[in-house]
Image (cartoon, coloured by chain):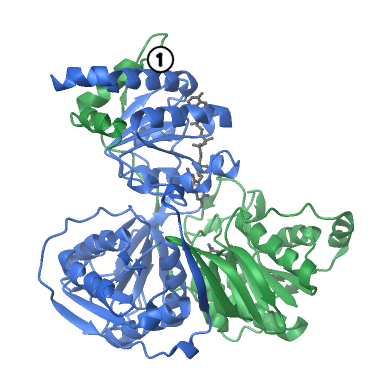
Amino acid sequence: MSEPTKAPAAAGRASTKKELPEHFKAYKHVWVFIEQERGQVHPVSWELMGAGRVLADKLKVDLAAVVIGPEGEATRHAAAEAFCYGADLTYVVADNLLADYRNESYTKALTDVVNTYQPEILLLGATTLGRDLAGSVATTLLTGLTADCTALDVDTDGSLAATRPTFGGSLMCTIYTLNYRPQMATVRPRVMVMPDRVERPIGRIVTHPLGLVEDDIVTKVLSFLPDRDSAKSNLAYADVVVAGGLGLGSPENFQLVRQLATVLGADYGCSRPLVQKGWVPSDRQIGQTGKTIRPKLYIAAGISGAIQHRVGVEGADLIVAINTDRNAPIFDFAHVGIVTDAIRLLPALTEAFRARLSPHSRDRIAS
Amino acid sequence: MHIVVCIKQVPDSAQIRVHPVTNTIMRQGVPTIINPYDLFALEAALALRDKHGGEVTVLTMGPPSAEDSLRKALTYGADRAVLLTDRFFAGADTLATTYALATALRKIGETYGPADIVFTGKQTIDGDTAQVGPGIAKRLGMLQLTYVAKIGALDLAAGTVEVERRSEGGVQMLRTKLPCLITMLEATNEIRRGAMVDALRAARAAIVKWSAQDAGVEDIAKCGLRGSPTIVKKVFAPPPRAEKAFMIEFGSEPPADALIAELFKRQPKLEADLVALARGF
Ligand SMILES: Cc1cc2nc3c(=O)[nH]c(=O)nc-3n(C[C@H](O)[C@H](O)[C@H](O)COP(=O)(O)OP(=O)(O)OC[C@H]3O[C@@H](n4cnc5c(N)ncnc54)[C@H](O)[C@@H]3O)c2cc1C
Ligand SMILES: Nc1ncnc2c1ncn2[C@@H]1O[C@H](COP(=O)(O)O)[C@@H](O)[C@H]1O
């Protein structure tokens, strides 16, 4: 096992001399920003409710959802759903000016609720919307923000311990916001486990006004072009994923990954260098700065398993690594490993799976 | 028109070490480049200048050696480079970084004319937070347009700009007022090669160097490590999975069937799932 570097042990506030400033002592409870865009709650919000519930229970405080959106059914429904994902109460800012996401109006809505009701922890999804909003809100509140966390915990003294991969190498770091409130963190989709939805009645809802008129908002939405479904890769939510890395050696060899994926009905992905080289489009990148996946089966061919890749795939049920280097770090976290040339194994694997999964052999399974 | 592009010098390789006592990054000895995401911002800025006239200033906060990145930006055609460098800035998190950069941007405005547009990259490859852009905008009271894929109509007389912004489920067409801050999406353009005249000019150009005091920083306590609300408490290598990977050994032929058998043995439901998937359910 690798030893932690010679860093002071994580001990939160206990290890610092400073007291939490008096005016922050009233800040209590864990909040999750519920992101909805065009009537749909982003699944990352419910994933964060699962993580937030654990933190709130450890701290023995409430878990609150914050729903911001236009008046009407979608926002009402999101607020009601929050209770089924573990909310003790829900704050709602509903105003038709919030129909489209705009930084100005959403920043005002969220900072106002935070300043009024004072949470100690505020979690947001690290989506385009969440990152746009979190940066503005944290700067307005002059508090700390830890982006793209891969683990959240609370310390013995109640501080939020937010862990994320650190720069470049093979290290993780745990970050605290000791003397400011709220402690803010963003988490990427699929990093946290989706909690079970439990049917529950609507609980306490606290509404808060937006306090803006359209003329106060400078940015205008001229139009919105939804993505065509075919243009979307569903990689983050795929059941089976096959991915290739630099070990494949050429864009042509990357076809071997796609062929295996096709036979498996799987999605395909890659490590970051392949995106940088332009071999594979960027929405196929897996890892810290790409997609986080949680498939039942993940097959990685010619990928070394750098920390930034690892954090994106660790949630997979079964990780298979194909690599010519017996000492590649990917074998530290794969379940099944095979030391061989992926360029030879992949076609053989594609054929073997094709035979196994063909209609003929399916009859055999059925009988 | 005056455009300022914030660029960051970042380590090029993964050979980064962490200082055992301060837990901050030790950058000595590691080759550096301009953060790749910032080149999309720089090219967008240069293209706007070529079309509408005006000047492009590049700004970076970093160690004295970050001058290299600024000079590189000049070879691409930037008109002026400002290096914000001071030991007080070391160890800054996003909030302290935006304090310093916003202060310098104000000073740039006073000295060389106010910026109509400030550009940043989408994110850095080392800090990787995507928060510095929004933070600067908020501190300067500028409107912010993040994840911009394309810059459309820029009307300097009316003081408006239209952009295509990537959002979760599609593309938003937005119009906002200048001055604004734009964070550019990757792969939306390609940095120009730079003309010979620019290379010659860049080699001789004087880089404007500002300390915290020169830039007009009023409160040193808001800079660097001291001004950072977040504290890195622990740096550690992630432990390997407790259970070692099961290694499939074999002779001369790659053992596809043995691998498949091992997978189905470990996850008995997997075969049925795969059959369903392969059928397109
Ligand atoms: C801020 C930051 C964010 C990052 N984000 C991501 C991210 O989101 N996702 C990501 O993937 N990376 C990310 N990276 C990059 C990451 O650190 C690694 O550099 C990258 O994952 C390595 O890609 P790779 O495994 O394909 O290439 P390499 O590390 O070069 O590994 C290639 C592997 O292929 C093996 N190999 C060679 N030939 C063969 C063969 N014929 N058959 C089988 N195996 C073979 C080699 O033994 C080697 O292990 C990030 C880096 C930084 C600094
Ligand atoms: N030290 C810095 N100097 C200048 N610009 C920076 C600096 N740090 C970050 N930026 C800008 O902010 C963007 C986002 O950075 P980050 O929040 O670190 O992902 C980068 O792409 C740069 O344009």
B246 over B118 or under it: above or below = above
Q: What kind of residue is marked 1?
A: Pro
Chain under callout 1: B
Element type where label 1 sits in the image: loop
Q: From the viewer's side, name the closer residue of A191 and A170.
A: A191
Q: 10 Å neighbourhood of mark 1: few (<14), some, or many (≥20)?
A: many
Can you tell me which quadrant of the image ligand 2 is in? Answer: bottom right
In this rendering, is residue A83 above or below A43?
below
Please state which of residues A220 and A348 is positioned toward the viewer in this rendering.
A220
**Quadrant of the rendered image containing residue A80:** bottom left
The image quadrant where one finds the N terminus of chain B is: bottom right
Residue B19 appears at what percent x and percent y? 51, 55
Q: In the drawing, does residue B261 fall left or right of residue B167?
A: left
**Residue for badge 1:** B254
Q: Residue at x 47, y 44 (%)?
A: A284
Residue B92 in view in this figure: no
- Tell me the quadrant of the picture where the C terminus of chain B can be found: top left
A151 horizontally vs B176: left or right? left
Question: Is B158 situated above or below B78?
Answer: below
Dot 1 beta carbon under 8 Å from ligand 1: no
In front: A23, or B122?
B122
What is the x, y in percent for residue A268? 42, 37
Q: Position of residue A345 (x, y in %)?
A: 43, 19
Q: Outermost residue, top direction?
A: B252
Q: Colour of chain B?
A: green
Chain painted blue: A
